[in-house]
Image (cartoon, rainbow, N blue to C red):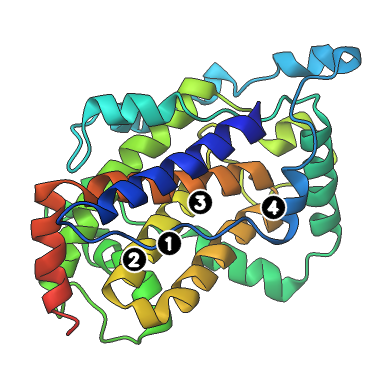
Amino acid sequence: MFKKITSYLFFWSISIVAFAQNSPISTIHPIEPAKNHYKTLQNLSSLPNNQLEAIDTLAFPPSMYNSYALAMSQSIPYYLTDNQFDFLKKSVAFPANSSAQTRAELGFLYDLQNKRTPKQVERVMQLAKIGYWPVADILSSHPFYKENLKHLFFECQEVIGDHCTAMNYPHTAKLLKGIMTDMRKMEFSVKYHLLRARPYEVDKRLKPLQVMGSPSFASGHTLWAYIQAYTFSELMPNKRADFLAIAYELGLSREIMAVHYPSDEETARQLAHSMLALMWQTEKFQNDFQKAQAEWK
């Protein structure tokens, strides 16, 4: 089921891009094919194994539900519509816990865990702290306000330099804030629709570097990493490979931490592209994007 749904999401993104080529609005870059272990693992069966059916009853525990995350899933969208959110939410699903794919993914995570180095741990824990949250941007007196805005431009600073700030690029900041508002709504809409148990809840051999307070699928870090990478690469096409490399590192960091399956990451990558492709076709997004684009010419 996972391969069919994510393949559908991939070709659906391509169809949006193809449609855009016949419209007065320019199109976004097509999504790159899956690579490395993401490509290999998704070729395995995602269907349940009847001999291990008990494990398929495992889900993210209600005692761990996060009220803020649930509230975000019901927030007002900025660029996309509620119908688009509902469609995308229902277009993805994760491999069964008992499937050959999930068993291989758990083995992959266990191998990563055994190979973790102190340097890797330090880096992934730094990356774990990165993330823009719309609620912290309401009042300038919020204790996280300045750091939150800095996180909004994390990828840009990694690729371009420290001058990439909300103050220096106000229209880009406005665009990113709108995108991230929709991204957070999508993240928690999908997570709480499907309630996938975290890898360490399914395989007790895994020792996560951080216990997470929301369901596993899809990866929120990876979703924001890629939707920002895709956006920045439309603003600066010659830097696309650099932005995608940062997004890839952010996704892999979640696996090194043993808090996400590779399928959480790959679905988030595809979902990010589909979200941006839909946003791209709206007048509101185009108005904001063109103003942001002018800042980079």
User: Is 279 left, or right, of 43 in this rendering?
Assistant: left
Circle 1 SS class: loop
Q: Which residue is mark 2?
A: 151
Picture coordinates of residue 90, whole percent (x, y): 45, 23
Quadrant containing the N terminus is top right
- Answer yes or no: do the residues labelled 2 and 1 have beta carbons within 8 Å? yes
Q: Amino acid at mark 4?
A: Tyr
Circle 2 SS class: helix
- Answer yes or no: do the residues labelled 4 and 3 have beta carbons within 8 Å? yes
**Local crowd size for mark 4, using a 10 Å CA cut-off: few (<14), some (14–19), many (≥20):** some
Residue 271 in sight: yes
**Local crowd size for mark 1, using a 10 Å CA cut-off: few (<14), some (14–19), many (≥20):** some
Q: Amino acid at mark 1?
A: Ile
Q: Amino acid at mark 2?
A: His
Q: Nearer the viewer, residue 270 or 212?
A: 270
Residue at 38% from the left image edge and 82% from the top image edge: 238
- Answer yes or no: do the residues labelled 3 and 2 have beta carbons within 8 Å? no
Q: Which residue is mark 1?
A: 130
Q: Which residue is mark 4?
A: 38
Q: CA distance from mark 2 to mark 1?
A: 6 Å
Picture coordinates of residue 276, whole percent (x, y): 32, 51
Residue at 48% from the left image edge and 78% from the top image edge: 242
Q: Nearer the viewer, mark 1 or mark 3?
A: 3
Q: Which residue is mark 3?
A: 269
Mark 1 vs 4, N-terminal side: 4
Check the image and report above or below for 67 versus 222.
above
